[in-house]
Image (tube, grey):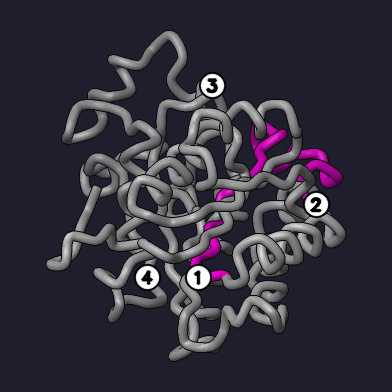
Amino acid sequence: MNQNDTGQSRLSGRTAIVTGASRGIGLAIAERLVSEGARVCLTARKSGPLEEAAAALPRGSVITVAGRADDPEHRREVFDTVAREFGTLDILVNNAGINPAYGPLVKLDLDAARKVLEVNVLATLAWVQDAVAHEKLRFSEGRGTVVNLSSVTGETPSPGIGLYGVSKAAVSHLTRTLAAELGPEVRVNAVAPAVVKTRFAEALYEGKEAEVAMGYPLRRLGVPSDVASAVAFLASDDSSWVTGQVLTVDGGLMVAGGTA
């Protein structure tokens, strides 16, 4: 837990929304923000896993709202609930993402491609739009911080997950564009991980983790807390002069010329 000179946690008194927070990277982000003093609204598609995740966090530190990230009604419910329960919003973490398609782009089902772009790109933009527009949350009154989850696949092609990489390249550029448009009231940054050991990424390392890790200068794959630490930095005042940046968290994979 990071503390300032007064001994207070650096996110004390702040409120956050984390999408896709029932497991993996999203849950690790929620845990880290809570540990640094924030109150957090966890969102994810299924209520059961979401409630299980919340039960593991300190009582009174979190609330949950289940629903699809690309559903406008769900977003409205989330923001209204945060306004009612917490009164303000300081941090928005767009972590929800999908990748239902694997294989070369020339054989990709276009309906699956549309769904990837809808959830990974358009929903990310929609969450920011709704946060800024919600009058009761005062997100755009010089207090808002957005952290989007991008990926190193948005920087260099990765075999089998090309469309996912296309969507994350869009998230990175969306981050930069929003930062330019929303400053100085709202800071917008992103974190771009390489392979992180989660259920979502299992297909990229299962049964060959040691071999895959050899491509990383730090000789290991990421874990969710690696990403959570970067998100907490970008959400805090420690990054108060940082906006429009995509922070690569990849164990050195990109400088070694690797791909996820």
Residue indicated by mark 3: 203
Residue at image position (68%, 68%) is 83
Nearer the observer: mark 4 or 1; the answer is 1
Whole-percent x, y for residue 43 in the image: 66, 46
Picture disc at residue 114: 2
Label 1, label 3: how far apart the Cα atoms are? 35 Å
Please state which amino acid type lies under the numbered disc 1: Asp
Label 4, label 2: how far apart the Cα atoms are? 26 Å
Residue at image position (62%, 71%) is 87
Whether label 4 touches label 1, CB < 8 Å: no
Whole-percent x, y for residue 201 in the image: 51, 28
Residue indicated by mark 4: 245
Could you tell me which secondary element the residue under label 1 belongs to? loop
Residue indicated by mark 1: 90
Residue 147 belongs to the span the image colors magenta = no
Could you tell me which secondary element the residue under label 2 belongs to? helix
- Up-down: is 66 above or below 188? above
Residue 112 vs residue 145, the one in the foreground: 145
Nearer the observer: mark 3 or 4; the answer is 4
- Closer to the N terminus: mark 1 or mark 3? 1
Whole-percent x, y for residue 6 in the image: 16, 67
